[in-house]
Image (spheres, grey):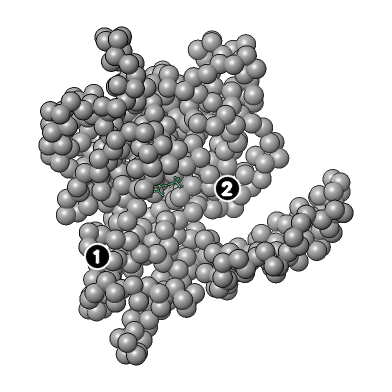
Amino acid sequence: MDFDEFRARGKEMVDFIADYLQSIEQRPVYPAVQPGYLRPLIPESAPQDPDSYEELMKDIERVIMPGITHWQSPHFHAYFPAASSLPGLLGDMLSGAIGCIGFSWAASPACTELETVMLDWLGKMLNLPKEFLAGTGSEGGGVIQGTASESTLVALLAARRKLVTQIQATSPDVEENIIMSKLVAYTSDQAHSSVERAALIAGIKMRKLSSDDKFSLRGETLKQTLEKDKAVGLIPFFLCATLGTTPSCAFDNIMELGPICNSENIWMHIDAAYAGSAFICPEFRPLLNGVEFSNSFNFNPHKWLLVNFDCSAMWVQKRSEIIGAFKMDPIYLKHDHQDSGLITDYRHWQIPLGRRFRSLKMWFVFRLYGVKGLQEFIRKHVALAHEFESLVRHDERFEIVSDVVLGLVCFRIKGTNDLNEKLLKKINDARKIHIVPCQLRDKFVLRFAICGRTVESKHIQRAWQIIQESATNLQNGPQ
Ligand SMILES: *Cc1c(COP(=O)(O)O)cnc(C)c1O
């Protein structure tokens, strides 16, 4: 492909993308294919001689689209949103073209410096304490990780390194593996599976503490467990609190947990993967009160802030604690400015070496929406969630299972779990909308998340009608 052809194909591709997104609601949101559907549709090996572009594009509709779950469809209400916006797509396109690998400042200064400033912009949108912002002369700062899972793992590893170093500073004879075997971390029984996984990867004991009847982890629960663990010689060192849990969008009580962590020398990490985006609205910002007690805080603009995947924003109050855990300096990565104290080498802040120019798409989104545009988007989604909630409440066959705070509604048909499982299957099998369930205590619950960028009231009304009809069919139909 030469540049002339690239110009032509590129313009066609933008049209193809615009057509796809503009007409996405006409497609069944969930694919009808069976596992293994794709292999028979394409050759067994790569072509020896080049295929034509026309042939390739024809295969997009034939091979790919039948197997796509359309996450950007306004009929998609599963999981949490996967952010996507037109400015975000354009920013990402340019990032792909620049194609730099920004592991150090010298590896592409703009890639590093824009990231630092974008994390400050975003931190200011959330009204984070200035300790987390890099441009305030503080010791903190932000970084873009690929996912919330990586942020939790990085925080856990940094906390572990910090504690081992502290203990060895006063007791140099205690071996690292002895300390490690006594460490214990905490999270709630509502935390995302990636938190438990981080502990598994790090080889650390992790306790899942019981949440209260609002699915919130409370200070008293942590305190009691700490006492027991310390009494048997364990060393508590890490807590991952969640703001906006995955099953029900519940909020751990960080105002209670934070001071306990601070006085017990426990690193508090906050995972607000989904809910974090809402904190740019002053009316939702109180949910973040207590962040000042945390060592690290993370949320995913790639979930709900219109910045296309992947973009997980993480801040720390002390850069040195995260860099201290991961720093390696082989000769081929050294550069002239690295010890000047003026620059950031993000490779010390993350697990991989390579990193994409992800701040570019943030810059496009923040500038082309403005803070007001982003706030409006969040508010619209929250209003749609309340609209759905009120539809559910008006049908006495159904119940709302947990408080609707942001864009997620947990509901179920009154009756057995089995009945709810059947209802879910009926809804998804029709492929007109897509939702996923969750388990809350002993209840099988349906989750309705407001996801698509273009979702409107009419989609919510239609979705509810489909759910109601499925329930009616289920109750009348053969058992
Ligand atoms: C979605 C989610 C995650 C996982 O996010 P990734 O960025 O895919 O790792 C973690 N925690 C919570 C609370 C989530 O909702």
Q: Is residue 61 visible to us here?
A: yes
Q: How many circles with numbers are drawn on the protein?
A: 2
- Measuring 87% from the left and 54% from the top, which residue is drawn there? 49
Q: Up-down: is 260 above or below 334?
A: below
Left or right of 261, for residue 93: right
| Quarter of the image with the C terminus in it | bottom left
As drawn, 59 above or below 479:
above
- Taking the image as shown, residue 278 lies to the left or right of residue 16, namely left
Residue visible at 59% across and 12% down in the picture: 337
Q: Judging from the image, what secondary structure is the residue with disc 2 in?
A: helix
Residue shown at the point (85%, 48%) measured from the top left: 1
Q: Nearer the viewer, residue 233 or 298?
A: 233
**Residue shown at the point (25%, 40%) measured from the top left:** 207
Q: CA distance from mark 1 to mark 2?
A: 38 Å
Q: Which residue is mark 1?
A: 443
The residue that disc 2 covers is 88
Q: Is residue 464 left or right of residue 174?
A: right
Residue 171, image x and y in percent?
A: 27, 10
Whole-percent x and y of residue 299?
A: 40, 42
Q: Secondary structure at mark 1?
A: strand
Contact, mark 1 vs mark 2 (Cβ under 8 Å): no
Q: Specify the amino acid type for callout 2.
A: Gly
Question: Residue 441's quadrant in the figure?
Answer: bottom left
Q: Is residue 278 above or below residue 477?
A: above
For the question of whether residue 237 can be seen, the reply is no
The residue closer to the viewer here, 451 or 265, is: 265
Q: At label 1, which amino acid type do we have?
A: Lys
Residue 43 is labelled as none
